[in-house]
Image (cartoon, grey):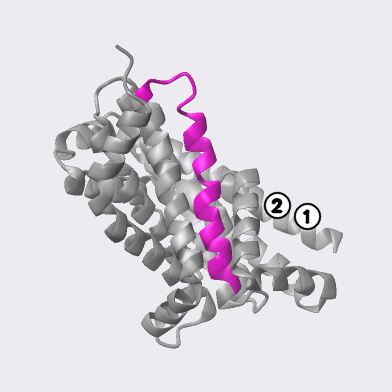
């Protein structure tokens, strides 16, 4: 049991290490262009939504995109209304990673590790060097998933672990567990990734995986709220809008949990369990955005009245 736990921790550390460095490396490679894209194409809520989606898919981190947005809002470069659209888009963009995780790409991680290492070893070009780092970190990310996937295999025969996972069958308890894990490891992608892996190994049911996914959406708000500390009122309102949107979406998801599970299963058409959980992540966030995007003016007025700008 100790060996299993250590292997899972090792895989998780590799995953989180890769996610953090991958986001930083891509931001470094893209440079100021990310900020330029945000400023150029965020002329209304829908265009801001598209920018948030594409940047999050590119950077593989909704938190990174939202934190960049908070910084730009704090600097008075972006308005609160523009930031709201980006936040909604980031919630859609983050679902791309769960689709990739469900593709069983872990077994190809050595190819990416070797290719990235060779590029770093032989290249003297800064551009190729950055490309090599990005490929290498993708390899580390997938290898971390592969490590966790192999590590949890023996847990099938552990009664204690099986009993603990049964708690996720209760949607509220599963969501609390997902939120708690995300709060600790500070990565909703890692939480959803673990849910997909456990579902693939038959250790977590579809309902349990979806409940954990719902909770991860709440846990991911913590780091973006931290980014608003000592910031402007506009920055604080951006963080609070992210929290409010996720909290309302999760509440609605829990209230309509069984119908939502049925919709996901119908859309997935007898797909493997891990693919169903990944699809639930994408459907939940897209449906949440489509429901709440129309309320952006209302929440803008509400938060402006609750937190009026000083002076």
188 or 25, nearer to the observer: 188
Identity of the residue drawn at 19% across and 49% down: 46
Circle on res. 6:
1
- The reply to whether dot 2 and dot 1 touch (C-beta < 8 Å) is yes
Which quadrant holds the C terminus? top left
**Can residue 126 be seen from the camera position used here?**
no
In-image side of 93 versus 261 (left or right): left
Circle on res. 10:
2
Residue 178 pos. (x, y %):
61, 57
Magenta residues (range): 208-233
Residue 214 pos. (x, y %):
52, 60
Residue 206 pos. (x, y %):
56, 76
Residue 57 pos. (x, y %):
35, 52
Measure how far apart labels 2 and 1 are at the Cα level: 6 Å
Q: Is residue 56 above or below residue 288?
A: above
Residue 265 located within the stretch drawn in magenta: no
Identity of the residue drawn at 54% across and 46% down: 18
């Amino acid at each position: 049991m100790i060996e299993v736990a250590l292997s899972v921790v090792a895989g998780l550390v590799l995953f989180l290490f890769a996610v953090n460095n991958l986001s930083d490396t891509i931001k470094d490679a893209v440079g100021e262009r990310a900020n330029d894209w945000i400023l150029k194409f965020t002329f209304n809520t829908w265009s801001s939504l598209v920018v948030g989606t594409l940047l999050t898919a590119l950077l593989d981190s909704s938190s990174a995109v939202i934190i960049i947005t908070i910084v730009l809002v704090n600097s008075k470069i972006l308005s609160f209304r523009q930031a709201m659209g980006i936040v909604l888009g980031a919630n859609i963009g983050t679902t791309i990673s769960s689709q990739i995780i469900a593709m069983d790409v872990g077994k190809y991680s050595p190819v990416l590790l070797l290719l990235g290492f060779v590029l770093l070893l032989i290249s003297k070009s800064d551009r190729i060097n950055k490309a090599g780092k990005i490929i290498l970190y993708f390899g580390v990310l997938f290898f971390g998933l592969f490590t966790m996937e192999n590590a949890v295999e023996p847990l099938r025969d552990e009664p204690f672990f099986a009993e603990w996972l049964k708690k996720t069958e209760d949607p509220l308890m599963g969501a609390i567990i997902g939120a708690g894990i995300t709060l600790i490891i500070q990565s909703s992608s890692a939480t959803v990734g673990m849910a997909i892996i456990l579902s693939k190994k038959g250790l977590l049911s579809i309902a349990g995986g979806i409940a954990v996914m719902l909770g991860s959406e709440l846990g991911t708000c913590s780091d973006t709220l931290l980014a608003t500390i000592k910031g402007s009122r506009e920055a604080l309102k951006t963080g609070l809008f992210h929290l409010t949107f996720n909290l309302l979406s999760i509440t609605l998801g829990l209230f309509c949990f069984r119908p939502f599970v049925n919709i996901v299963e119908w859309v997935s058409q007898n797909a493997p369990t891990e693919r169903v959980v990944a699809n639930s992540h994408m459907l939940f966030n897209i449906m949440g955005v489509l429901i709440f995007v129309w309320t952006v003016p209302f929440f803008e007025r509400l938060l402006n009245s609750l937190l009026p700008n000083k002076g």
